[in-house]
Image (cartoon, rainbow, N blue to C red):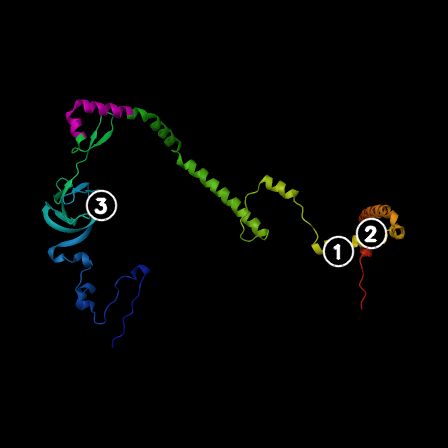
Amino acid sequence: SAPFPQVHYSNMAEWGANKYYPPDYDPRKHGSINSYRGTHALGVRAKKIDQGIIVIRFEMPYNIWCGGCGIHIGRGVRYNAEKKAVGNYHSTKIYLFRMRCHFCPNYIEIQTDPANAEYTIMSGARRKVEVWEANPDNGTILVDKNSDDARKMAEDPLFRLEHETEDFNKAKKAVPTLVRLKELNDRMANDYDLSRKLRRKLREDKKEEDDRRQESRHMGLGLVDLLPRAETDQKEAETVSFRSETPRAHAETLRMKQRIMIKSADIFSTPSSSSSSSSSSSSSSSSSSLSLSLSSVKRREEDKAISLQAAEKRMRMDPALLARSRPTLSPS
């Protein structure tokens, strides 16, 4: 069997295109690949090419009313239309476009008019008449000649005078708005300076953002974005204090203070003798012994607090005392 032909694509847009050439295809004999397959290059758009008709995308040139359903079809609506040459105007061909309304089965036929540079509706629709007429104030108004207002404007002088007065009042009220819009337009006229200021502002913001990103990386925060600095943040940061030692070191310091307090306390200040004497007294003096024991306990707590303060003061004055008070472990 013949080898499968290799196909190369210049870009991905050609992937969906038909690039296959059969093994028995000979360009000298068959010409183009479309002639070999018996198809047209336009595909289904040329299914009536034998009648001189091709399908194109037609855009409605003006507003019309459909003759079948009576629905308004706006200018710019697009249809798949059959295009056919029906004559000539000197050397310019005249084309007829036939399409179906998207609201009903009615077909609309529109023909070119090279003599008037216009499109003419042949059948299936009616054109909506809209003309622009100049008013006395050097403006333009849109008039639909088929409307009731247009007929009254042409026939009734009082109706026309009423509308002219109303339009004049509307224009008079719109003067402040127009003046404000003109001032705004004048202010925005020098767009180069405005654009230059905007670009400078954007460059400054981008530079500050890059500086904050570099500072964040320098502090080891990684991808965390820092916010702009503020004076309130700096003041709050100055009021915050952190513990410089770990919990284990803090507990060790407390133990050293207690050990120094015990070593520096007087062994004869304990209320053991008074407690023993009060316990050996008679039951009749139980209330007096209870008061003596409470006072001894209070005195002992006061002595303990005084000893602790003295130990802390001694440690601050002589740091070597803390090193000597640490227990030393003898090797076993």
Could you tell which of marks 2 and 3 lies nearer the N-terminus?
3
Q: Is residue 155 magenta?
A: yes
- In the rendered image, residue 183, in percent from the top left (x then y), is placed at 38, 29
- Judge left or right: residue 328 versus residue 71: right
| Residue that badge 3 annotates | 77
Segment colored magenta: 149-169
Q: Residue 318, labelled with which disc?
A: none
Could you tell which of marks 2 and 1 lies nearer the N-terminus?
1
Disc 1 crowd, CA 10 A, few/some/many (<14, 14-19, 20+): few
Circle 2 or circle 3, nearest the eye = 2
Could you tell which of marks 1 and 3 lies nearer the N-terminus?
3
Quadrant including the N terminus: bottom left
Q: CA distance from mark 1 to mark 3?
A: 89 Å
Disc 2 crowd, CA 10 A, few/some/many (<14, 14-19, 20+): many
Circle 2 or circle 1, nearest the eye = 2
The answer to whether residue 26 is seen in the rendering is yes
Q: Residue 252, labelled with which disc?
A: 1
Describe the element under mark 2 as helix, strand or loop. helix
Quadrant including the C terminus: bottom right
Q: Nearer the viewer, residue 268 or 236?
A: 268
- Judge left or right: residue 231 versus residue 273: left
Q: Amino acid at mark 1?
A: Glu
Most prominent secondary structure in the magenta stretch? Answer: helix
Disc 3 crowd, CA 10 A, few/some/many (<14, 14-19, 20+): few
Circle 1 or circle 3, nearest the eye = 1
| Residue that badge 2 annotates | 261
Q: CA distance from mark 2 to mark 1?
A: 14 Å
The answer to whether 266 is drawn above or below residue 61 in the figure is below
Q: Is residue 240 magenta?
A: no
Describe the element under mark 3 as helix, strand or loop. loop
